[in-house]
């Protein structure tokens, strides 16, 4: 289980939660969330169209690969009644979502996408965090670090493994 999600589960004493994941791909992490947390509803957001991953290799994820991933995600998540799949870009899905207990950001890893996701959703989720805070994903590190400085009085940055997340200081 990803460190941020374990933190959310443990610090809320396994309370029922409403959450979202940006970037679902094959649905592996979404399934892990549904299996290991007490989830009322998980919004799984992904447009499943070809894209550039945005890490240092600027890897393109092809149309065939992403379509296969979508099929796999739909199969993997179909047994769960508490998942709501939103086939859109994250920024187009903001108004489809209620207030969230947590948001896990794992879409494209370039600075622009991560920065936009953090800002678009900062008022929408109690805890915001995500994946790939590491040397291969400078865009993620930059976006998270700038947000941290701008919100130093409001929230505290936690990191563990490749995960990052902001905990409100009011917690
Ligand atoms: C690294 S994969 C996600 C892996 C998944 N979170 C897991 O751990 O099982 C990235 C996914 O983000 C999606 N993506 C890229 N840009 C996005 C955006 N703006 N909004 C939502 N999803 C996006 C891609 O289509 C791709 O499926």
Image (spheres, rainbow, N blue to C red):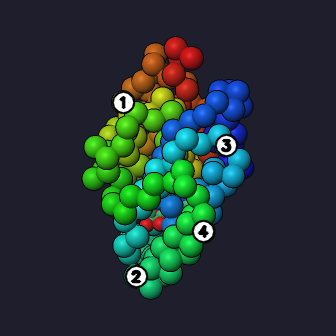
- Counting residues from the start of the chain, the first of labels 4 and 3 encountered is 3
SS of the residue at dot 1?
A: loop
- Answer yes or no: is residue 145 visible: no
Foreground residue among 167 and 67: 67
Is the residue under label 2 in contact with that under label 3 (CB below 8 Å)? no
Q: Is mark 3 within 8 Å of ligand 1?
A: no
Q: Can you tell which quarter of the image residue 146 is in?
A: top left
| Number of on-image labels | 4
Residue at image mark 2:
63
In three-dimensional space, the C-alpha distance between marks 2 and 1, rounded to whole angstroms, equals 33 Å
Q: Name the residue beneath numbered marker 1.
A: 123
Name which of mark 4 and mark 2 comes first in the sequence: 2
Q: Please state which of the two labelled residues, at mark 4 or mark 2, is closer to the viewer.
A: 4
- Mark linked to residue 76: 4
Q: Quadrant of the C terminus?
A: top right
Separation of residues labelled 4 and 3 (CA atoms): 17 Å
Characterize the local packing of mark 1: few (<14), some (14-19) or many (20 or more) Cα atoms within 10 angstroms: few
Identify residue for label 3.
37
Quadrant assignment, res 52: bottom left
């Amino acid at each position: 289980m990803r460190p941020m999600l374990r933190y959310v589960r443990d610090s809320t004493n396994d309370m029922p939660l409403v959450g979202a994941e940006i970037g679902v791909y094959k649905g592996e992490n979404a399934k892990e969330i549904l299996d290991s947390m007490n989830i009322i509803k998980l919004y799984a957001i992904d447009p499943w169209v070809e894209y550039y991953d945005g890490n240092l290799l600027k890897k393109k994820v092809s149309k065939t690969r992403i379509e296969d991933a979508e099929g796999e995600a739909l199969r993997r998540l179909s047994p769960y009644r508490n998942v709501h799949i939103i086939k859109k870009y994250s920024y187009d899905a903001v108004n489809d979502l209620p207030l969230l207990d947590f948001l896990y950001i794992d879409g494209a890893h370039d600075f622009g996408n991560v920065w936009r996701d953090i800002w678009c959703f900062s008022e929408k989720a109690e805890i915001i965090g995500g994946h790939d805070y590491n040397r291969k994903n400078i865009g993620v590190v930059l976006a998270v670090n700038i947000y941290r400085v701008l919100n130093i009085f409001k929230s505290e940055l936690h990191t563990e493994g490749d995960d990052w997340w902001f905990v409100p200081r009011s917690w």
